[in-house]
Image (cartoon, rainbow, N blue to C red):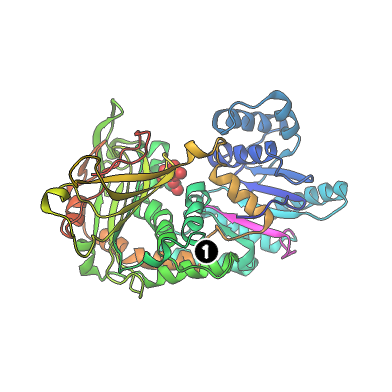
Amino acid sequence: MQSARKPDATIIIIFGAGGDLTWRKITPAFYNLFLDGWLPDKFAVIGLDIKEMSDDQYRERLHDGIDQFSRSGKSKQEDWEKFAQLINYRKADFTNSKSYEDLSKQILEIEKTWGEKSNRIFYMAIPPAFIEPIADQLGKSDLAEDKDRARIVVEKPFGRDLTSARNLNKILCNIFNECQIYRIDHYLGKETVQNMIAFRFANALFEPIWNRNYIDHVQITVAEQVGVEHRGGYYENAGALRDMIQNHLLQLLCLVAMEPPVSFNADEVRNKKVDVLRAIRKYKSDEVNSHAVRGQYDKGWIEGKKVISYREEPGVNNNSETETFAAIKFFIDNWRWHDVPFYLRSGKRMAERISVITIQFKPVPHSAFPAESIENWHPNRLILNIQPARGIKLRFQAKKPGLKMILNPVEMDFNYDHIYSTDPPEAYETLILDVMLGDATLFMRGDQVEAAWEIIMPILDKWQIASSADFPNYVSGTWGPEEAEALIAKDGHNWIMLQAKSVEGSQMK
Ligand code: BG6
């Protein structure tokens, strides 16, 4: 979100430096920022983890991660050697104050050679249970004393319910000011998601019709083909509602529904999103079943390959009641959106990997055309393709060429790949650069996270007490359980058919 300036001198301290996230996402992101010239001239990473490793052993592990996961492909030897010099590793016990004293000494030594103080970014790439003891130790040490320079980055899941999220906020806010806390939701760093703000607020065309008078309903689909992979242990205690809806999908909903911000000040944008979250209708327990559907994948086929059911995945209980799919109908009780349904769905092992937002407009109030010309009449539809296709399409009616007036839906299509020749940065690159620059616009504020949990809690509570006797209830490689179709069909709609593989992006029913 920032303009083109490089960050000040920075030291990133990664807790969980030996973990998967650091290997797959965080270090490749740093590496690409390095290649593109975004890292400050004075920059160092200190990786901390429990394992004994030399700097060189650690660097080699990261080298392998970069070669596998960097968007710029396999690293060139010369680039890698320069980048590797920026990385240090230390074995640390996160609960022992001595580790923090040693860390402090190392940071001071680096700053001494630089001849200046640096921003200190404490990156929590660790399971949530470690956050409290680490934050506690940081608070006791002198490491985070400088409120202008110390920042903490916290990955999701941010709590597992409203109570634990509130506790976590309390713990962090005892040590850091809110403006020092960067809660990551990586969807907000995606190029196409950031573009939603540009699309909505840099164009005068749509804003006047962006409301209940013209919009019939909104659909947000985030579908994945992968199963839980090696994350069965984590996922068993999460489920689709916590893992995807509470954060990524509700954030997408906020971007669709928020009022225009007065400026791009981080708090101004986040205030507008919190307003949306607060206006979302909270369901009573007896309303949950008519507004929310859950599912769990059975075995099936993905891309011609046989895949196992969720209950057979490693780390998963063979009677598991954890949902791998959720579809929910939300309402936003405010002036702009009153009575406009927002249908959200997300699931694993679905037919396609695709994330799409569809704005379905209302039909024209009166048709002046004869019956034979309107056989193929569809109201306007705007499709925001988030991934893998990236772009925006607008469907409208046109006259089919010929001697008769026959109407036919056609599309205007903005496709990133046709317009831009360079690959956009990965979400983590954008977000990490923003942390270094001190811009929190794309991060979740404490009250935002809590407001999102407040919406989800009645559904979580209901699902907790009511058993899901029909699990598994959808075959891998399909669009989820039949009840999800019924949820939307009872309002006279259907989930818009999506095809990620199509060159043009999503197709339409
Ligand atoms: C993560 C979830 O936040 O997002 C994962 O924990 C999910 O379960 C992932 O697979 C999806 O992200 P993306 O960027 O691949 O759509």
Q: Label 1 crowding class (10 Å Cα cut-off): few <14, some 14-19, many 20+?
A: some
Give the residue drawn at x 56%, y 45%.
Answer: 428
Q: Quadrant of residue 303?
A: top left
Instruction: Judge from the rendering whether residue 91 lies leftward or rightward of residue 463; answer left or right.
Output: right
| Ligand 1 falls in quadrant | top left
Q: What is the span of residues highlighted in magenta in the rendered image?
A: 143-155
Residue displayed at 66% across by 54% down: 3
Residue 205 visible at all: yes
Q: Residue 12 in magenta?
A: no
**Residue 254 placement, left or right of 298:** right
Looking at the rendered image, the quarter that the C terminus falls into is top left
Relative to 367, is 230 above or below? Answer: above
In this rendering, the answer to whether 23 lies above or below 152 is above
Residue closest to the far front: 403
Assign the magenta stretch its main secondary structure.
Answer: loop
State the count of labels: 1
Mark 1 sits on what residue? Answer: 168
The residue located at (40%, 44%) in the rendering is: 413
Q: Residue 329 occupies which quadrant of the picture?
A: bottom left
**In the image as oriented, which residue stretches furthest toward the left?**
371
Q: Is residue 149 magenta?
A: yes
Q: Amino acid at mark 1?
A: Leu
Residue 403 x, y percent position in the rendering: 19, 41
Q: Nearer the viewer, residue 463 or 503?
A: 503
* Spot occupied by residue 405 in the image (x, y as percentages of width and height): 19, 47
Regarding residue 323, the answer to whether it shows in the image is no
Residue 186 x %, y %: 50, 50
Foreground residue among 303 and 342: 342
- Would residue 355 be found to the left or right of residue 202 on screen? left
Front residue (pair 490, 51): 490
- Tell me if residue 181 comes above or below residue 22 in the rendering: below
